[in-house]
Image (spheres, grey):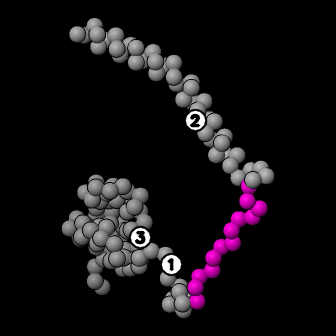
Amino acid sequence: MADFLDEKKREISARLKELRPLVEEYQRLEAAQRALEGVGPEAPAAPAPRRRRSPARAAAGGAGRGRPRGTGTRAKQALELVTESPGITIPELAERMGIKQNYLYRVLPGLEQDGLVRKEDRGWHPKTAA
């Protein structure tokens, strides 16, 4: 049985080695095709004009797309964890929340701007009432 498995492993390795240059060529050709899209006679003459904000939105304070800042459950969850564990770092928060760190690098400065947390060194602390 071990001989059979060793033989199959060798066959697979040999086939992968054989196919690698073809896969690399395929990826190069795909990249070239993407680079050439939009070039040539069938390309659009000019990009579509940008749309302006509606007068109603501008009158309403110029709110951007999406939901208002601070209404997400992740921000609330992060705030709870900072309150429970003062000095917690973003990597620790991300691990405890089961999410990627890059999201928290956007959320926590927003909470800081809202006066809910403060940063000391690498850790985050709840904002104390002054």
Instruction: Kindly identify the residue that appears in the image at 64 percent across and 46 percent down.
Output: 34
Q: Is residue 25 visible?
A: yes
Label drawn at residue 27: 2
Quarter assignment of residue 76:
bottom left
Q: Is residue 23 above or below residue 33?
A: above
Please provide the residue range marked out in magenta.
43-55
Hey, which residue is sitting farthest left in the picture?
84
Q: Which residue is mark 3?
A: 109
Q: Is residue 60 above or below residue 101?
A: below
Label 3 sits on a secondary structure element that is: helix
Image point (63%, 36%), residue name = 29
Q: Which residue is mark 1?
A: 64
Q: Nearer the viewer, residue 44 or 35?
A: 44
Residue 49, image quadrant: bottom right
Q: Is residue 120 above or below residue 19?
A: below
Q: Are marks 3 and 1 in contact (CB under 8 Å)?
A: no
Viewer-side label of 2, 3: 2
Give whichever of 44, 86 is nearer the camera. Answer: 44
The mark that comes first in sequence, 2 or 3, is 2
